[in-house]
Amino acid sequence: MTKNPCIFKIIILITFVLNGISSSIGQGLSWWEHSNPPHNNYSKELVSEWNTKNPTAKVEYEFFAMTPYLKKLTTALSTRSAADVFTVTDSILPSFTSKNMLAPINPTLLGYKNLDEMKKAYLPNSLDGYIFQGKLFAVPVIATPLSLYINRKHFIEAGLDPDKDYPKTWEDITKVGKKLVKTDGNKITREAFDFPMHSSTWTMWYFNAMIRQYGGEILDPSGKKCTVNSDAGIQAMKTRVMYSQENKISDPTVSFATNALPAEDLPKGRVSMFITHAGSVAQFGPEVMKDIKVVPFPQANPKRTVTPLYGFAIAINPQISESQTKAAHEFIKFVIKDPKAWYTNTAYPYPAANFLDLPGIEDARKNKHLDVFLSDIKVGKYVQRSSQILEINEAIHRAIERVVLKGDVPKSSLDQACKEIDTALAQQ
Amino acid sequence: MISYKNWLKIVGVLFVLPALLHLFVFKLYPLIEALKLSFFKYDLMSPPVYVGLLNYQNLWDNPLFHQSFFNSLIYMLGVSIPEWFLALALALLLNRPILGRPFIRLAYFIPIAMSQIVVAVIWKFMYHPEGLINTIIGFIGIDRINWLSSEQTALASLIMIGVWRGIPLFGIIYLAGLQSIPKDYHEAAMIDGANVLQRFFYITLPLLLPTILFVIVISLISSIKVFLNPLVITGGGPNGSTKVLPYFIYETGFTYFRMGEAAAASTIMFILIFFLTLFFLRVLKKGDI
Amino acid sequence: MKTSFFLRTLLSIVTILGIFVTLIPFFWMLSTSLKTGSEVFDLPIRWLPSVFQWQNYSLSFSRAAFDIYFNNSLITGIVVTASNLIFCSLAGYGLAKFDFPLRNFLFKFVLCTLMLPLEIILIPTFLIVQQLDLLNTLFGLMLPLVVDGFGIFMMRQFIRDIPNSLIEAARLDGCSEFGIFWRIILPNCKPALGALALLVFRDNWDQFLWPFILASKDSLKTFPLGLAQMESVDSTAYQEIMALAVVGIIPMALLFIFFQKAFVRGIALSGLKD
């Protein structure tokens, strides 16, 4: 024992250090996501890659049915049984942070000097949606705008050039729409244009953008009062309903809640122009996409371009230990290391600042409308941040239903929505 | 020494005990928790805060809650009442000797054997303005109806699905009830010269009364708990016209993080079904249906 | 039965028509399970796939661990059904044939437990299972479902109709109380047991919310969960969901055929006699 005290001390030191290291990475992590086939498969690949490289700190990946996913997450956090790391959608962030359901993200653990430096790695506005009170709460992996998809064949049949005559403003839609719509007496047999109407989340995405285009916002700057019934809101609503009411190029009863998939009408040629997200490219498939052109989200005022933006991000459970949190950061750093792979594998754009310049992306720019998506993302804004956002979504969705399906006057419908929203805000 | 009578009482309690204990733990305890919670404000993450009757007050002031309440009432009665009669009709039909009866019965069983998720998707598609239902009614010259996008027809559309699923279920229950009536009763009546209608009203129905009561209670209770179809098919719309109470509760608690208010709404829903059940039981035991 | 030929024919026609109406959704489901993705929602409605896509069946099962999900649903179905049969008939007997204090009150309590909406008892139930350290176990999944008031209600109704004389006679013969239950009561309500088995199994097979909230591991998910997670915002393969659902009907149909005789004769003798 005393023959070589130095070596002995070194052995103890090494054991000590090894123990320290293993205790911080030896536990393994759990990662939850909502079901979303192309995306889940890539996540699983990432996980098995990580597990091969880190056999002592394996990640367990689970995914759950999409619609009730939030309920499960909420219940799990409430009962302290949630995964260490979980994927969330951007809009619920304020609800979650206001209830301490997300752990703040430390940019230095992701390899950045500070938050400002990290912002530079992302497209200008795409990280902002995840920042509250100066702290970052989730790391985006997907960002997608809503854009306008048009049917080339229909345009050409109507004597229009899809590459030159595509609509850029809401008014343009009416102009080309009148040439595209097909009617049989009073009935519309082929809609020229329609909005998705199957979910209040989608409604908020495009309606928030529209009200912003007209210079307004859902809530006032303090976030405590509803301003949807302002002039901007009323104008947005009027635009929303004019295609079915005045211009008769749209039949909302056809697309409302009647298709299991929101954009099903477009690939079936039952509507010539439709607003949907980047994921539809994969949904429709290359055969259908041959006849479809993606153009930027319509605008009200070319001087004030705003588009809808939403995304998915990975967040960390605030109820786990510090060492687990560090491990979570390590894992997230690994997950986001290859933006191009995210895009190739999930068909969703990734909000990296240099995304369009990544090697190998040229083909996608040409053939997969990536340019349009990125240009829309650049002027995109996430939905209004509010801890009551889900309730606000529902109120606005109902307001639109009243106007579009029942023919209510925009002002009174929006007034009612504001009453409901103000009541919800008061309960904050 | 315990008397024999008391010994039997103990035995009775022992028989009931296991199930009762389970119900105490898994039903009574949550019920009490829910009732307690209705007097608190609870957002699932921070500790609950006592607020007295505030949740009930908020519900009272909330037109959306009123809408849900009445939606549920209409849905409940709209689904249950037709079920009581149509299921009986089905049972009478299937009680007759027909070729291939087991297979016919299996055919009628299929709607309840189908998974509820799939039922929702299929019916939603059938209700499309250019879908199957409109095509069928088009054959008899009725104009296209916008089933799911009109406030007037959306709830009725869901009610029809509920009835479609309920008729086989209760039909089978009625069928069993019919088959328990000894044939001798009918034969004796026929000998006495009673016709089909008379036999039905004076023999079948009275002997079927216990089954009818069973069907009434169960159909009322199960119809008020339905919320998957409104959730998946119409999202509670249009304009909240298909948002039934369980949906409202689910949303208020889990989506809006107002668990206390959800608990209060649950309590009210419980009271509704309790008194409605009591009402129908009283009416039918007094009356001579 | 002297019914006119005309009436009989009319009734047969009505019966057959009724079957068609009842089964239309099922037919669409069947045909859709063999369509390609783009044919699913064709309008006007498409009854026959252009080419039968038999591979939808094998493909759909490969999307997720459906063999596990199916198994879990089967296991939980059998266990929950069996336990309901046992505990509910025990309790039903106690409520029907014994007169102890608070008996009627307890019966009304049992009815009240049926009136609770699931959403509100979800979290307390979860917490109980969590306290018992049974999260993410099949046992934890089944435990809250092991007894349900519906079965107690039904068995109580049924057993009431069994003549007391049978029980008295058995007692005079020196039969133990449990022996009476086992040898007199149970055999006399086989039909009700069959009916209860069918209804409980069916209900369990379709259960979504509770297993969804509880199961956080893939190995614990049940069949409805598997169906639900096939849905996403885009690229939901409805033809595959239908294929899965068609297979999902098989256990139910088998059970129905098996129990049909017993169960139909069974519920018959019950009914509310207050």
Image: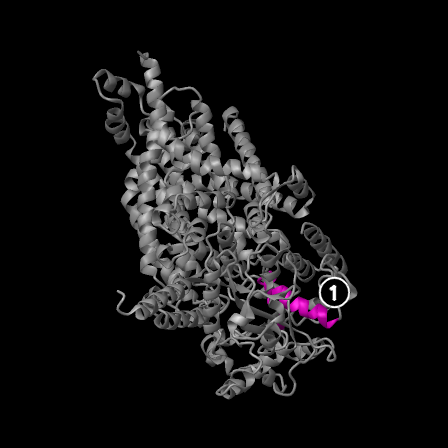
Residue in the foreground of this view, choosing between B96 and B79: B79
Quadrant showing the N terminus of chain A:
bottom left
Give the class, few, some or many, for how many residues have Cα within 10 Å of label 1's Cα (few <14, many ≥20): many
Residue B208's place in the image compared with C121, above or below, is above
Residue A19 visible: yes
Residue C71 lies, in percent from the top left, at: 31, 54
In the image, A13: left or right of B82?
left
Residue C94 lies, in percent from the top left, at: 35, 25
In the image, A341: left or right of A205?
left
Start and end of the magenta stretch?
A192-214
In the image, A65: left or right of A107?
left
Dominant secondary structure (helix, strand or loop) of the stretch shown in magenta: helix
Residue A52's place in the image compared with C141, above or below, is below
Mark 1: which secondary structure?
A: helix
Residue to which mark 1 is pinned: A233
Residue A94's place in the image compared with C264, above or below, is below
Q: What is the three-letter code of the residue carrying label 1?
A: Gly
Residue A34 lies, in percent from the top left, at: 47, 63
**Number of marks drawn:** 1
Chain of the residue under label 1: A
Residue A86 lies, in percent from the top left, at: 49, 62
Residue A161's place in the image compared with C141, above or below, is below
Q: Is residue A133 magenta?
A: no
State the image quarter where residue B276 is shown. Answer: top right
Q: Is residue A195 magenta?
A: yes
In the image, A4: left or right of A403?
left
